[in-house]
Amino acid sequence: MGLIVQKFGGSSVANAERVMNVARIVTDTYKQGNDVVVVVSAQGDTTDDLIEKANEINPNAHKREMDQLLAAGEQISISLLAMAIEKIGCPVISLLGWQAGFNTNSIHTAARIKNIKPNRLQAEIAKHNIVVVAGFQGINRYDDLTTLGRGGSDTSAVAIAAALKADKCQIFTDVEGVYTADPRKVDNAKKLKEITYDEMLELATLGAQVLNNRSVEMAKKYGVELEVLSSLNPIPGTIVKEAAKMEKMLIRGVTKDKDVALVSILKVQDTPGIAFKIFSKLSAKNINVDIILQSFGRDGTKDIVFSVSKDNGPIAKELLEDMLDNCEIVCNTDVAKVSIVGAGMESHPGTASKMFEALYETNINIQMISTSEIKISVIIDAEDADRAVSAVHKAFIPND
Ligand code: ADP
Ligand code: ASP
Ligand code: MG
C-alpha cells in the first residue's frame, strides 16, 4: 500500500475499449489499498492530427495558440478515463495541468516545469479520489496554457511522483518495457530487466522514443525509480534506477535518430577565433550543435563540419552564409545517427572497433564519430540507418 503514479501513453487510451482497460488497471491498483494518481496522454494520434489541422490554416501560427490547441488532446482523455473509472464504481476526479498545479516557464510548445503546487492533488488524494491528470501541459506566470514538447507526458508523471514523493512511478506503454533496440524494428531486440538512469538518458536522447529524455533526467535528479511496462500485457517491465547493484552490460541498447542534419563549411579561413565566431553565432540563435569535426588547416583554409537537428540545418546554413565570405557551405539532411549505449564499455576496450567492423561488413560508410564514456555514435547516410541498427545489434546482442 502506498502512493502510486501511473502514466498511460496515447496508444494505451486510443479508443473506448483501451480506456476501459486502463480504468481496470487503475481501479485494481486502487482497490488494493493504494492512493493512485494517473497521468494520461492524448488518445492515439490526436496530437499529430491537431498539429495537422493547425498547419492547414496557418503553418506559422503563434506558438501560444498551438498550446491552446494541443492542450485539448489531453483534456479529452482525462475526462473519458474519469468517466470509465466512475462506471467501474470508484471515486475519481480529472484535473487539467493547471488545476494540478503545474507551473512552467513561458517557452510555448517546449515549456519546462518550474514547480508543482501539490495542494489540490493532495486534497483530492485525502478525499480518497483517484486523480486523473492531463499530461504534457501546464500554465505560465501570465496564466497562459503551455505544453512540454512531444512525449512530455512522461515528464508530467515523473514530476508528480517527485512532488508527492510517490512510492512508485509506472510508465505504461504499448511495448513490454525498454528493449535493446526498438522491438518494432529489430527482430531480436531483448527486453531489459533493468537499466541505469544514465544509460536510459542516453538511449532516450539518441532516439529511443519509449521514454522522453527530460523525464529520465528528472527521475535521476529526484531519485524516482521508474518501471516501464505494457498496458496490454500485465507482466513485469523494465526498472530504471541508480547504478548501484546493477550488473554492467557491455551494451544496453542500439538507437537510431533521423532528426539530424550535417552542415559543412568548406575552405573557411584558418585563423584564430573562427570556431568561436561560428559557434557563438549559432548558440545566440539557440541552435544546439551536437558533433563537431574540424580538419587540419592547409594552404590557409580548413573545413568544419557539425551536426544539428534537421530543422536547424537550413537555418544554420543561411546564418553562416550571411556571416562568412569565401567559403562553401553545404547542408545535408539525408543522414542519421546510430548509437550504442552501455556503461560496460567504459572498462571494455575494443567496443568501438567492434561497432565499426559490423558497419564495414555491411558496407556502410561512416561520416562522423562521437564518443563519451557510455556511448558511441556514428553519422551515416539515412538510407543505411535500419541496416546499420540491425548489424550493430547482431554484433553485440547474442541471439538466444
Ligand atoms: P506512448 O504513447 O506510450 O508514450 P511512445 O510511442 O512514445 O509510447 O513510445 C513507445 C514506442 O517506443 C514503442 O512502440 C517502440 O516502438 C518505441 N521504441 C523505440 N526504441 C525502443 C526501445 N529501445 N525499447 C522499447 N521501445 C522502443
Ligand atoms: N500527446 C503528447 C504527444 O503526442 C504528449 C505525450 O504523448 O506524451 O507528444
Ligand atoms: Mg511517449
Image: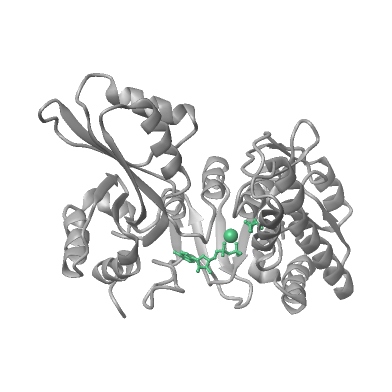
Depth order, front residue of 189/362 = 362
Residue 37 showing in the rendered view? no
Residue at 62% x, 51% y is 152
Examine the image and state in which quarter residue 200 appears: bottom left
Total marks placed: 0
Residue found farthest to the left: 299
The picture places residue 225, in percent across and down from the top left corner, at 56, 53
Closest to the observer, 390 or 37: 390
In the figure, 280 relative to 307: above or below? above
Question: Toward which corner of the image does residue 92 lie, by quadrant?
Answer: bottom right
Q: Where's residue 34, x and y in %? A: 75, 61
Q: Is residue 236 left or right of residue 83?
A: left
Quarter of the picture containing the C terminus is bottom left
Figure colour scheme:
one colour
Q: Is 251 positioned to the left or the right of 204 in the image?
A: left
Find the residue positioned furthest to the top: 272
Picture coordinates of residue 301, whole percent (x, y):
17, 29
Quadrant field for ligand 3: bottom right
Instruction: Give me the residue at 37% from left, 32% from top.
Output: 321
Residue 203: tell me if it is visible.
Answer: yes
Question: If the image is split into quadrants, where does the N terminus sit?
Answer: bottom right
Q: Nearer the viewer, residue 96 or 61?
A: 61
Would you place residue 101 above or below residue 92 in this image?
above
